[in-house]
Amino acid sequence: MTYIDSEFHRTKARELMKDAELVFDADAVQKAVDKVAQELNQRFDADDSEAFPLVLGVMGGAVVFCGQLLTRLTFALEFDYMHVTRYGSKDQGGTIEWKVIPRSNVEGRTVIVLDDILDEGETLAHVKERLLQMGAKEVVIAVFADKDIGKAKPCCADYIGLTLPNKFVVGYGMDAYGYWRNLPAIWAVKTGG
């Protein structure tokens, strides 16, 4: 969800946490980041031909995951970001919108896309296709969380920190009405109305 500055949404965001259910605590979150870092390091440290991949964070949700994951990566990389969304001010997906296109040249390169959550997979499928059209040699997707929605997705992640139940979640980059990205744990909240 995108930030909407209104007293209604601030009040609604506060109310969401009253009945929120803890899904993963802060320790489990950090272990998930460690897991993704170890797997990426294992691949990219081991292969000199993969030197200097371009790492692209999908803003704004991936900002927390990117910031903490990057400090755990031991291989040389270039970092940039993009801002792609299909949620806008809603809690249901809509039309994909590119707000910021990466400035770095992707042509002929291995690109590692970092995102907070693989939900329905539409956005990351679109991102992968667009980067390949821009000339990327390979697009590797690493997500902090993969939501188990009970059906096939148009895009799968190559590296996954943890799997979430099919609930609306906040924390560690994931938001409701633009709020709660800053929580160090993952909480399931009830939405509606």
Image (cartoon, rainbow, N blue to C red):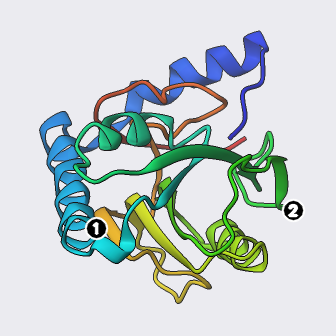
Looking at the picture, which amino acid does disc 1 mark? Phe
Q: Label 1 crowding class (10 Å Cα cut-off): few <14, some 14-19, many 20+? A: some
Give percent across and percent down for residue 16: 51, 29
Please indicate whether residue 12 sits to the left or right of residue 147 in the image. right
Q: Label 2 crowding class (10 Å Cα cut-off): few <14, some 14-19, many 20+? A: few
Q: Name the N-terminal-most of marks 1 and 2.
A: 1
Residue at which label 1 appears: 44
Give the residue drawn at x 59%, y 35%.
176
Give the residue drawn at x 48%, y 30%.
181
Secondary structure beneath label 2 = loop
In this view, the residue in front, 107 or 32, is 107
Q: Residue placed farthest to the front in the image?
A: 48
Residue at which label 2 appears: 95
Give the residue drawn at x 42%, y 58%.
52
Please indicate whether residue 107 sits to the left or right of residue 69 in the image. right
Q: Quadrant of residue 69?
A: top left
Residue 19 makes an appearance in the image: yes
